[in-house]
Amino acid sequence: MGQIVCSNSPTGVKVNGHHHHQEMVKNDSQKSNTCGFQMPLHYPRYKKEDYEKMPEWKLDCLLEEYGLPTNIGDVNQKRKFAMGAFLWA
């Protein structure tokens, strides 16, 4: 059997007709991280007063960033939803 260069390998490592599973998983996870939801590293640190003054576009961005729905009503309903999701009582 001849040697094949794995197209999924970022280094072009030659393997004996088989793909390295670890390299394929790594590439698949890299591809999946380029689109779709990815959990942010930090929890939002807004106070209740910040949410009460926050414009609708900023609420939408915040909710979308955390994978939460934005089609939940008017700006006041979005504020209540964001406060319920992110503020600790």
Image (cartoon, rainbow, N blue to C red):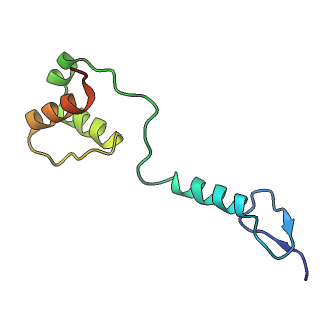
For the N terminus, give its image quadrant.
Answer: bottom right
Name the residue at 10% across, 37% down. 77
Q: How many marks?
A: 0
Q: x, y (%) of residue 33?
A: 52, 51
Residue pictured at 52% horizontal, 56% vertical? 32
Figure quadrant of the C terminus: top left
Q: Residue at x 35, y 40 (%)?
A: 65
Residue 31 falls in image quadrant: bottom right
Pick the front one: 10 or 86: 86
Q: Give the left or right position of residue 45, taking residue 72 as reference.
A: right
Residue placed furthest toward the right: 2
Reply above or below: 27 against 68.
below
Q: Residue furthest bottom?
A: 1
| Residue 42 placement, left or right of 55 | right
Place of residue 39 in the rendered image (x, y in percent of width and height, measured from the top left) = 43, 41
Residue 26, by quadrant, is bottom right
Residue in the picture at 15% in, 31% down: 79
Q: Quadrant of residue 86?
A: top left
Q: Is residue 69 left or right of residue 37?
A: left
Viewer-proximal residue, 18 or 11? Answer: 18
Q: Provide residue 54's location: percent of width, then percent of height.
A: 19, 26
